[in-house]
């Protein structure tokens, strides 16, 4: 029998069906438990707010919507009550704007501005405590005798904001306290150790540099942290601050600082442990660490530890390197742990770029960090530009115990200068040693070059010119910061002696010199070096900026009839040479209107670099004005400088300086745009 057949429905069944059909409406009409539990007070209540939000939800208005229980609507869709308005305003007035801003930011009173149920009584209690809070804040800046006046102004009639009024605070900070003395005391091994005498003097000297500065809590903290940093940087990595005291004399408005350092026992370097090395030989890491000064039995030195870490990272074999001294054992000799994450054995890099000198550039580079059967690293490169094409490969052996490594290099190049096309090959075999400050090379080099001139075919000829030479080179770097130096210098020298090959053999000497120096033009307070502030290279340049002086020179001494390959001679001009002239536009003039490389070269550049400031803040931009000059000749007495002048801007990007220069060539009477990226020496 069908219960819902109208012919079979009884009266009792009709009543049951009617009750069931009305149940959704009955469910909606029932009071919610939240409504029944809502407190009848004006204070905010989270449960009440949740109920209000639920009632306002679109889901609750749908026919048949079930309230409460597991079928409750999504809480994420509930509307939220708008933030409370400020119950009162705060105005802080001092003679110094920076001081007023500091007090406004840190005043405890401002935490209660948006408390919904704050009334006059509670505000009065807060105002009674405000002077003590202000004195504590001013004390951190060295003001210990302030005059504070706090007035509560009632709101204007009819005002809709700040119903409790405006709190006006007038502050006269009083006289400023300055540091009269800064003293450091020692406990433990450092107190009497002869080997730590220089370290003690350095810590004391750096601490005394705070004398005369305004006493503030940040300055006091930097004095303590600076002393501790100097202690733990050498010999005593377990050192700590045993006691510290800032004695304030309110009568003389002076502060006397006292720091007691506990050194603990000295720590010596133990064995070197390498973690994470699988593809590449861990012996090389141990050698690099020892070459950086981490030899077993030597005193702990944080600077040497960081140098070792950087040296391993610069090797190219590892994507990340972390080096530390394991002090957990508590022994006097602690092992050095070097954790590495290895790079992939092979890498292919495709590049697209360009320059104002040579137009668009396409490149492909392949690196194999471990050549099978040999264990050497191979780096090969193919580069194509408008006037230059290059194919090169460089192979280097693993590092030896003395820091030297063998290397082999080969390259083939094609170079177009005006009407002359030079095709050259070069083979180099030698050894090199690289350190953070000094690079040294010793190598034998074979050069071969063929020059073809479509206009002066008879004058230039197309015979290959060959030479072999033995060379030594040094490159010294002493910059305060890389890649954004503010002071320091770099010097590179290469000396070679060789002979030409072929039917005419003549000996020759070749010398090349590079120098780059930076001179800051104004005295800048550099608390970083006085151990009172962390290093901040972006803030070491003053508004006057710096001067950058660049010098390049080269000379090849040989008989007049020596058939020297063109690649051993010199040309000048371009982005990194003499601006205002094209790439390799400065040379020995030729009858066809072009230039040829010469045996002597001299280039100089003077640049004034000034940071650009905005609203008292140093931006990453710098303005530049410069003068460049360069000359190339076959005789030293024939050198005649070609001058370029101009201006430009620098942007300190994450990959190095981005340089945009507009230069005027005095001899060509033309303006050229020059672009370059990065810093290298």
Image: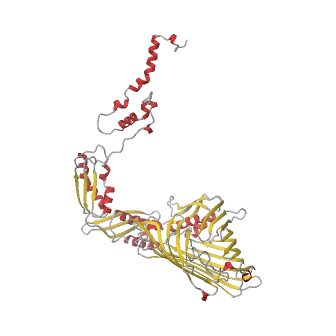
Judged left or right of residue 399, residue 151 is: left
Q: Quadrant of the C terminus?
A: bottom right
Spot occupied by residue 635 in the image (x, y as percentages of width and height): 63, 87
Spot occupied by residue 396 in the image (x, y as percentages of width and height): 67, 68
Judged left or right of residue 103, residue 571 is: right
Q: Quadrant of residue 226?
A: bottom left
Q: Quadrant of residue 475?
A: bottom right
Pick the residue in front: 331 or 157: 157
Pick the residue in front: 216 or 87: 87
Q: Quadrant of the N terminus?
A: top right
Instruction: Determine whether 28 is above or below 641 in the image.
Output: above
Q: Residue placed farthest to the right in the image?
A: 503
Spot occupied by residue 478 in the image (x, y as percentages of width and height): 52, 74
Query: Looking at the image, which residue is at 63% across and 64% down?
Result: 283
Query: Looking at the image, which residue is at 69% across and 74% down?
Result: 428
Q: Quadrant of residue 258?
A: bottom left
């Amino acid at each position: 029998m069908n219960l819902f057949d109208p012919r079979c429905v009884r009266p009792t069944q009709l009543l049951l069906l009617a009750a069931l059909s009305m149940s959704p409406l009955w469910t909606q009409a029932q009071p919610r438990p939240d409504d029944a539990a809502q407190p009848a007070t004006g204070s905010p209540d989270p449960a009440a707010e949740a109920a209000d939000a639920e009632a306002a939800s679109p889901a609750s208005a749908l026919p048949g919507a079930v309230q409460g229980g597991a079928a409750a609507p999504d809480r994420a869709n509930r509307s939220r009550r708008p933030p409370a308005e400020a119950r009162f305003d705060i105005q802080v007035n001092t003679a110094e704007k920076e001081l007023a801003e500091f007090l406004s930011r840190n005043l405890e009173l401002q935490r209660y501005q948006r408390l919904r149920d704050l009334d006059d009584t509670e505000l009065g209690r807060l105002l009674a405590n405000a002077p003590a809070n202000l004195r504590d804040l001013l004390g951190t800046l060295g003001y210990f005798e302030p005059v504070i006046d706090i007035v509560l102004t009632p709101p204007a009639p009819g005002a809709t904001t700040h119903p409790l009024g405006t709190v006006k605070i007038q502050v006269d900070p009083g006289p400023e306290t300055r540091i009269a003395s800064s003293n450091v005391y020692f406990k433990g091994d450092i107190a009497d150790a002869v080997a730590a005498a220089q370290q003690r003097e350095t810590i004391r000297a750096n601490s005394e540099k705070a004398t005369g500065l305004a006493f503030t809590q940040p300055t006091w903290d930097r004095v303590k942290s600076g002393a501790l940093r100097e202690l733990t940087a050498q010999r005593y990595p377990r050192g700590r601050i045993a006691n510290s005291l800032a004695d304030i004399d309110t009568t003389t408005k002076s502060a006397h600082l006292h720091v007691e350092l506990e050194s603990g026992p000295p720590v010596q370097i133990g064995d070197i442990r390498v973690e994470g090395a699988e593809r590449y030989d861990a012996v090389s890491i141990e050698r690099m660490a020892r070459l950086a000064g981490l030899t077993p039995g030597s005193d702990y030195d944080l600077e040497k530890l960081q140098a070792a870490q950087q040296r391993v990272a610069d090797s190219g074999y590892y994507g990340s390197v972390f080096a530390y001294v394991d002090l957990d054992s508590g022994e006097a000799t602690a092992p050095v742990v070097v954790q590495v994450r290895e790079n992939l054995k092979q890498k292919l890099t495709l590049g697209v770029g360009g320059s104002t000198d040579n137009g668009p550039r396409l490149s492909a580079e392949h690196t194999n960090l471990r050549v099978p059967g040999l264990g050497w690293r191979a780096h090969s490169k193919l580069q194509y530009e408008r006037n230059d094409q290059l194919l090169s490969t460089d192979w280097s052996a693993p590092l030896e115990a003395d820091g030297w490594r063998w290397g082999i290099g080969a390259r083939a190049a094609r170079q177009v200068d005006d009407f002359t096309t030079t095709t050259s090959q070069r083979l180099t075999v030698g050894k090199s040693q690289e350190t953070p400050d000094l690079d040294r090379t010793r190598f034998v080099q074979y050069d071969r070059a063929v020059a073809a001139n479509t206009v002066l075919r008879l004058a230039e000829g197309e015979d290959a010119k060959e030479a072999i030479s033995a060379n030594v080179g040094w490159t010294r770097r002493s910059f305060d910061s890389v890649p954004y130096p503010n002071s320091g210098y770099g010097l590179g020298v290469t000396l070679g002696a060789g002979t030409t090959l072929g039917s005419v053999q003549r000996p020759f000497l070749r010398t090349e010199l590079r120098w780059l120096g930076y001179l800051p033009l104004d005295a800048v307070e550099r608390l970083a070096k006085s151990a009172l502030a962390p290093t901040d290279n972006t803030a070491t340049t003053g508004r006057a900026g710096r001067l950058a002086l660049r010098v390049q020179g080269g000379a090849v001494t040989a008989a007049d009839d020596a058939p020297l390959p063109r690649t051993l001679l010199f040309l000048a001009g371009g982005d990194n040479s003499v601006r205002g002239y094209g790439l390799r536009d400065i040379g020995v003039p030729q009858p066809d209107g072009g230039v040829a490389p010469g045996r002597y070269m001299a280039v100089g550049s003077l640049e004034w670099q000034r940071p650009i400031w905005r609203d008292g803040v140093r931006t990453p931009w710098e303005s530049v004005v410069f003068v460049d000059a360069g000359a190339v000749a076959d005789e030293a007495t024939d050198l005649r400088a070609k001058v370029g002048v101009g201006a430009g801007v620098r942007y300190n990007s994450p990959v190095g300086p981005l340089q945009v220069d507009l230069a005027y060539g005095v001899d060509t009477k033309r303006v050229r745009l020059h672009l370059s990226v990065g810093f290298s020496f």
